[in-house]
Image (cartoon, rainbow, N blue to C red):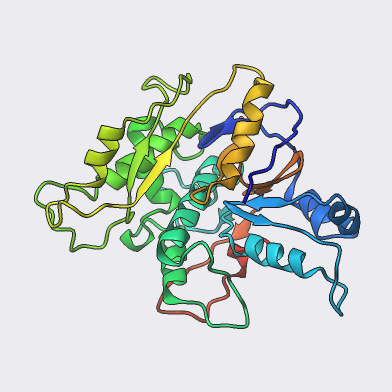
Amino acid sequence: MQQPTFKVEARKLWIPIYVKKLLYSCSMRRLQERLLGPRWTSAAASGGDIWLLGICHKLSNSVDDSGISPSFSEFSLDFESRIWITYRQGFEAIESSKLTTDAGWGCMIRSGQMLLAQALVCHHLGRAWRRKVSQPFPREYFEILEYFGDSPTKECSLSIHNLLDVGKPFGLAPGAWLGPYALCRTVESLAKADIRPGQKFEQKQVLPMVVYVAGGDAEGERGGAPVLCKDDVMSTCTGREDDPEEWTPLLILIPLVLGPDKINPRYLPALRATFCFPQSLGIMGGKPGASTYIVGVQDDQVLYLDPHEVQQYLKISPANTEVDSSSYHCR
């Protein structure tokens, strides 16, 4: 399939995992109005294909007996199947901070959790998996959600509690907003904690993949061209003690600044083209203090999942497959 040529406006952004601000600023409510509400007819008439995390949804004007376009229904199901992680309240206090909510400061962590959740879905369930309410959900789905449960327990290894604990050396602290570079290094440290000398890999790993952070600066988010050293990647993904020849799945994170105040327009087509890659996990980005998880593009707009909605704490466990997990999906 030929990749499209994108025409976009020159606006500020951050890119994977750091985009310096948003291509298109809208809340999830406005996004729903544009694509799911009464204006959908005009949006469909534009004929713009939607690229959603490596899959192209070609929209058409044809509708079925219910008045809904089958092509839009396929896109909608794909979009709704992405795991949406937002602010929560009512969870166990984070360490000694007495904070029982991350509202107002945890959006970057939530955006990072959504990116990691997408990586885990692709690994365990495949990119073609869809959350169909008419069918039983697989156990792996609930195991993935449990990883991100808001609890300091080992079962919730990717919870906001545990990410803050692992990220202390990089400046992560309860109640404080953080940048993408710090979160990249936190995820990298979390993955490395599973790989210890002499370990036989019989234990359940926090992440079933290795993490490689390309670019960035040890002193902070000062940019610089991302460098992916092939030899380093090869040595990272192979050489396991139990099977030196086996390739371990790889997650590449790229913290990158494309300008101090605004982005050069020449970067935008390349950034948009990353959503055409079948390996795409999207972009974490937003203006300082307001991060989102960008998952797709259509014409000169982006589609994203917004963590800035406070929901009640929910305990998820693979032992309870009857729990209502709808709050982890944006409809």
From the image, which quarter does the C terminus lie in? Answer: bottom right
Q: Where is residue 77 in the image (x, y as percent from the top left)?
A: 66, 67
Furthest toward the top, the residue is: 260
**In this picture, is 48 found above or below 167?**
below
The quarter of the picture where residue 7 lies is: top right
Q: How many marks?
A: 0
Left/right of residue 156 with respect to residue 24 in the rendered view: left
Q: Position of residue 172 (x, y in %)?
A: 42, 35
In this orientation, which residue lies closer to the viewer: 16 or 246? 246
Q: Is residue 42 visible?
A: yes
Q: In this view, does 71 lie above or below 272?
A: below
At horizontal 31% and vertical 59% (from top left) the residue drawn is 154
Question: Farthest residue toward the front?
Answer: 2
Please say if 93 is above or below 316. Answer: above
- Front-most of 221 and 94? 221
Q: Which residue is drawn at 70% across and 37% down?
A: 5
Which is nearer the eye, 112 or 102? 112
Residue 95 seen in this snapshot: no
232 left or right of 113 in image: left
Residue 43 on image: x %, y %? 85, 52
Residue 39 percent location from the top left of the image:
90, 55
